[in-house]
Image (spheres, rainbow, N blue to C red):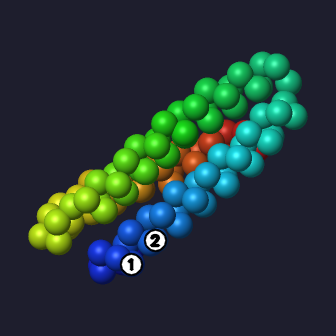
């Protein structure tokens, strides 16, 4: 991940957009699933959307943070970023 604040913001925004696409792909699979499987997809998609919104909130916080505080904000985002990546991968593995 980037060490420069502006580069980091751009990387995070791109990652959020990437996650949005992954969640949309899961939604497409859910639309084709049986009723029981669709419910499981929906639960997972709802969870992922909540996490994605949290990441967007953290990006907004990063944008508002001072130059001196951005490193502290970045630490929290790095952890959430890793968790979101894992959640997306887990969802794909679960519904293969």
* Figure quadrant of residue 95: top right
Res 79 seen here: no
As helix, strand or loop, the secondary structure at mark 1 comes to helix
The residue that appears at 17% across and 66% down in the rendered structure is 66
Foreground pick, 74 / 6? 6
Tell whether 56 sits left or right of 48.
Answer: left
Tell whether 48 sits left or right of 36.
Answer: left
Q: Position of residue 40 (x, y in %)?
A: 68, 26
Tag 2 residue: 11
The reply to whether dot 1 and dot 2 touch (C-beta < 8 Å) is yes
User: Residue placed farthest to the left in the image?
Assistant: 68
Q: Position of residue 91 (x, y in %)?
A: 62, 42
Q: Position of residue 62 (x, y in %)?
A: 29, 60
* Figure quadrant of residue 27: top right
Q: Position of residue 10 (x, y in %)?
A: 44, 72
Tag 1 residue: 7
């Amino acid at each position: 991940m980037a060490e420069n604040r502006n580069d980091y913001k751009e990387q995070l925004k791109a990652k959020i957009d990437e996650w949005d696409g992954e969640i949309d792909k899961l939604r497409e699979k859910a639309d084709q699933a049986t009723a029981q499987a669709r419910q499981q997809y929906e639960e997972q998609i709802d969870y992922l959307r909540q996490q994605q919104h949290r990441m967007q909130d953290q990006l907004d916080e990063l944008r508002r943070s001072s130059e001196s505080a951005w490193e502290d904000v970045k630490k929290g985002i790095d952890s959430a970023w890793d968790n979101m990546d894992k959640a997306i991968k887990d969802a794909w593995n679960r519904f293969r």
